Amino acid sequence: MRGFSRTLIYVLFVIVIVFFLSLRAQKSQTVELFRAPLTSFNHISGEVTFKRRGDNSEYVVIKLKENPPFELIVLVVEKDGISREIGRFSGATFIYTLPRNIKFEKLKKVELRSSETGRILAETYLTNKE
């Protein structure tokens, strides 16, 4: 009898741990804030998506239809005109977690610039925010 009750306690303990882990996983679901296609000046097509995780961190996902022939610089422009470089990429997908001091609500547009010439190749205005 003594071993049975100890085993029962261990099983209940494991069930409680699994229950709390599942609750934690439900809180960390991701919410899509904004999705829009890129407006291209140089035949670069794709879309920009902003998402918020359960821990309130925000990130941007840029998916291009094909790999660009050169490296691109990703800039975010705030409503007050401040432009910040958040990264560079040369593949088809760019994912970046925004720093806490850059909020999605403060952003005006996302630009993709050529690292070779500095020209704006594609952009998305974030005006359809709800």
Image (cartoon, grey):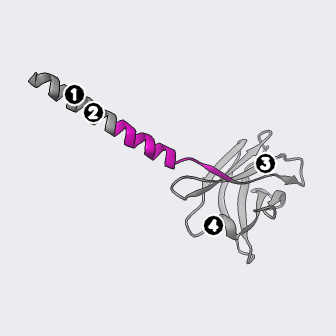
In primary-sequence order, the first of circles 4 and 3 is 3
Instruction: Find the residue positioned furthest to the bottom.
Output: 80
Q: Are marks 1 and 2 in contact (CB under 8 Å)?
A: yes
In primary-sequence order, the first of circles 4 and 2 is 2
x%, y% of residue 89?
Answer: 68, 49
Say which mark, if any, is on residue 71.
none
Q: Locate residue 67: give its quadrant.
A: top right
CA separation, marks 2 and 3?
47 Å
Q: Which residue is mark 4?
A: 103
x%, y% of residue 116?
Answer: 77, 56
Q: Amino acid at mark 2?
A: Leu
In the depicted structure, whether residue 18 falls above or below residue 7: below
Q: Which residue is mark 2?
A: 12
Q: Secondary structure at mark 2?
A: helix
Using residue 39 as the reference point, say whether residue 32 is left or right of it: left
Query: Does the magenta segment cover residue 28?
Result: yes
Q: Amino acid at mark 3?
A: Glu
Q: Amino acid at mark 1?
A: Leu
**Residue 12 in view here:** yes
User: How busy is the neighbourhood of tag 2: few (under 14 within 10 Å), some, or many (20 plus)?
Assistant: few
